[in-house]
Amino acid sequence: MRKKVDFLVIGSGIAGLVYALKVADHGKVLIVTKDKLDETATKYAQGGIAAVMYTPDTYEKHIRDTLKAGDGLNDKEIVKLTITESTERVRELIEWGAQFDKEKSGKYDLSREGGHSENRVFHYKDKTGFEIECTLTKKIKNHPNIDILENHFTIDILTQHHLGREVNKKTKDTNCYGAYVLNPETNGIDTILSKITLIATGGAGNVYSTTTNPKIATGDGLAMVYRAKGAAENMEFFQFHPTSLFNPTENPSFLITEALRGFGAVLKTTSGEEFMEKYDERASLAPRDIVARAIDTEMKLSGEDFVHLDCTHLSKDDLIKKFPTIYAKCLSIGIDITNEMIPVVPAAHYMCGGIKVDEYGRSSINKLYASGEVASTGLHGANRLASNSLLESAVFSHRSAMDSIARVHDVKHCEEIPDWDASGTVLNEEMILITQSLKEVQSIMTNYVGIVRSNLRLKRALKRLEIIYKETEDLYKQSRVTQSICELRNLINVGYLIIKMALNRKESRGLHYSIDYPRTVERKNGYPGNDYEF
Ligand code: FAD
Ligand code: SIN
């Protein structure tokens, strides 16, 4: 089947939906999403969306906090534009119907998370993402110019390569003409031709064995762009959230929001000692890279599989009111958080790097934008500040939409793109080949490319991954295309990018920590960002 649209949006989290709503008055929009419309990381976001709203907060303070968390590798101009546009984007979500908690006075009840020097996180209890996703999907479904294809898996973006043409050596320009999409009804592959395409496929937490990310987070968009020779960056910075619920049989891991620490919960060893002061003056509210590494160290010292998060000293009524999801979840496995400590452990959470984009979300491939977790805008540097991700998605989807609207009328569809060629693919591969390889990839990444790294471990990981890569590419060439083999292939690509970029970084910086490069200047004294002037 062939389809022609003005705007193709791949992904239905905050990044895809905000963009779709904005471009929909200027052409036909098709949203392709590989699961149900709302099955996204966005839906599971707990803590909230950061934005400057009231004094004593200022843009300057939020910018400094973002730079400090990012260990000085952020793009300062991008940080400035994102933060100064934060208020407008959050107001827009509110206008569209999103509810955020308010105080009795009518002011928004802003919370605090690690690395923030002020309370600036808009939230709806501990299920902010659910509130945002519901608000956006309601609007999307009512827009006459937007079509949605659920359970449709995008395999690859279309470029000159599919016309059998090489990229012009002089200009090096690659163009995007749409995408090949797996149709679950026919099991065939549809050709979607678009004038402009947005990749908003989210993160890749499933490259690790333990992650807070939903199953859909397999790095598909990034892998597609990498295969199309588009630029990617900063992949060595994979964020581990310090506090996921220790419940070994559960996958994905349930998140215990950082907002709970912002509300006063404290990290302790299993023998009841507070330990974060040893690592950072901001203790339990230090940025995530520092807290996750501290927990990792304490677990190694004690030999235990978890540490504790203690909120038993906090008001029972407030805990239940502000964190109803966490209270109910913990109770369901026999932990009453109002009088028992929560066992927590770090889990892979957020891909700080991704498809390299500019200030309008334009990737290195013409007519291809990227927004949300899949994109690397330069905002996060070496480590993302909590609750800056939903914000980044809203800001960059708006910017990408404005730029796309200005260009779409000058673009023509590329009719010569051929349909998918399935000849030679005869195997129905056995699932065991895929599930076993997936487990191997996750185990390699977890054991050799986790919170603490070394050159030896990274090199070993690369060698092992190369074997699985070759096996999987062979299998892919012979097999009928399925979502699972594509996801495996994509995760291998993501793993490869993380390892390669980690090997290239000859220092410990932010989330990339290598025992071969001890930090010489402790951040206690030399925070990048302290000297930032607005
Ligand atoms: P997603 O919301 O993940 O959406 C990705 C979409 O792409 C999905 O619709 C998926 O089906 C689709 N897709 C993927 N691959 C394909 C394919 N091949 N074909 C078709 N469709 C595809 N950030 C904050 O700022 N604040 C928070 O409080 C917060 N809490 C979090 C809590 C949890 C548990 C998690 C996991 C993350 C949290 N984050 C938080 C991070 C934040 O939620 C995500 O970074 C953000 O929601 C990403 O939005 P997105 O639109 O880029 O991707
Ligand atoms: C959390 O609620 O702790 C997650 C926030 C985030 O990932 O930004």
Image (cartoon, grey):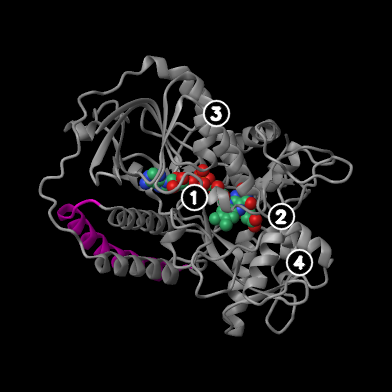
- Counting every numbered tag in the picture gives 4
Is label 2 in a helix, a strand or a loop? loop
Of 35 and 457, the residue lying toward us: 35
The magenta span reads: 453-481
Confirm whether residue 87 shows in the render. yes
Q: Name the residue beneath numbered marker 3.
A: 399
Q: Say which quarter of the image contains residue 478.
A: bottom left
Of 514 and 385, the residue lying toward us: 385
Determine whether the beta carbon of the residue marked 1 sits less than 8 angstroms from the nearest atom of ligand 1. Answer: yes
Camera-near label (3 vs 1) is 1
Confirm whether residue 70 shows in the render. no
Q: Name the residue beneath numbered marker 1.
A: 39
Residue 119 shown left or right of residue 129 in the figure? right
Residue drawn 63% across the image and 70% down it: 294
Is label 1 in a helix, a strand or a loop? loop
As for residue 503 lying within the magenta part, the answer is no
Q: Name the residue beneath numbered marker 4.
A: 265
Q: Do tag 4 and tag 2 residues touch (Cβ < 8 Å)?
A: no
Residue drawn 60% across the image and 62% down it: 255
First in residue order: circle 3 vs circle 4: 4
Residue drawn 37% across the image and 56% down it: 500
Of 362 and 93, the residue lying toward us: 93
